[in-house]
Image (cartoon, rainbow, N blue to C red):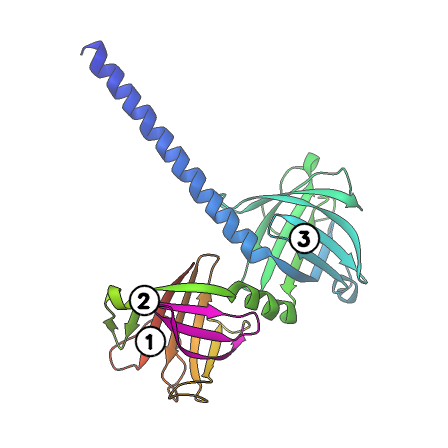
Amino acid sequence: MTFRPLRTMIVAAFLSISSLALHAADANDEAIKKDRWHLEGTWRITSLEVNGIKTAEQDARSLFVINGLDGSWALRADGIDISKGTTTLDPSKTVKTIDITPTEGSGKGEQWVGIYELGENTRKLCYAPAGRGRPTEFGSKPGSEQVFVIYEREPVEATKLERKRLEGTWQLIALERDGNQAPDDDVKKLGLTIGADGSWSLTDDGNQIVQGTSQIDTAKTPRTIDFTPTTGNDAGKVSYGVYQVTAKSLKFCVGHPGIARPTEFSSAQGSQHLMFTFERK
């Protein structure tokens, strides 16, 4: 084998490895953004265990943590912030990891390493001082110096935050009705604008064709939404649906007025369900 083909193979292999590494880094960045987006908001502590000793439930439930999209957090008791700091996440691990750095108040200057788990409206966190090593499971035994916390999202806060996430202008990219896919040319003309108060308007090629109000329930799985047009032929008639929202996409599966609420994101033939997929503009 000559030197030139060998060198070419080595360079190609190196570029391939570099490409894979960059792809993995991009995927992890997206995963971090997704978890940050999920963590944003106000969470009540429902269970707190420190070094194997469980705190009284009423004391634990008096504590709140407010998480920001940038990784910032504040621990609050009786309406007063008693500690603030930042976090670093790594959701690529088998058990997701978190590093916590208090920057103000209680614990300032310390470094904690931990693991976390996210549910729809609940989450778990287990951490310890950096010198004790990162926990490998959720719990706290005597002498471990581990802190094990369970949170639940504040219901009123959850609805307010969800309204914020839904707010904005969305471009329709796919529409299915009774199992039939709408043509792309028709789909791309439709847009949806949602207000912070739940108001909405549907446009066709930039022209408003119907508007209305909506009600959401973030406690249900999947989350539910009720649309009530205030203009058009169906004004006052409620359509029941389910939805799923991320930072970049929005899905609705909605029945015609009077049709039972869908239980999944699909539009089978004869179901009288419409499946909308939007992307944020």
Crowd class of label 2 (few under 14; some 14 to 19; many from 20; radius 10 Å): some
Asked if residue 253 is positioned above or below residue 71 in the image, the reply reads below
Q: Which amino acid does label 3 sit on?
A: Phe
Q: Do the residues labelled 3 and 2 touch (CB within 8 Å)?
A: no
- Can you say which quadrant of the picture contains the N terminus? top left
- Please give the residue where the numbered disc 2 appears in the rendered image: 189
What kind of element bears circle 1?
strand
Magenta stretch bounds = 190-217
- Can you say which quadrant of the picture contains the C terminus? bottom left
Compute the Cα span from label 3 to label 2. 50 Å
Where residue 106 appears, as percent x and y from the top left, is: 80, 46
Give residue 203's quadrant in the image. Answer: bottom left
Mark positioned earlier in the residue sequence (1 or 3): 3
Q: What residue type is labelled 1?
A: Leu
Crowd class of label 1 (few under 14; some 14 to 19; many from 20; radius 10 Å): many
Q: Does the magenta stretch include residue 18?
A: no
Q: Which residue is drawn at 54% across and 61% down?
A: 119
- Please give the residue where the numbered disc 3 appears in the rendered image: 148
- Please give the residue where the numbered disc 1 appears in the rendered image: 274
Q: Which of marks 1 and 2 is in front?
A: 2
Label the magenta part by its dominant secondary structure: strand
Compute the Cα span from label 1 to label 3. 44 Å
Mark positioned earlier in the residue sequence (1 or 2): 2
Asked if residue 52 is positioned above or below residue 229 in the image, the reply reads above
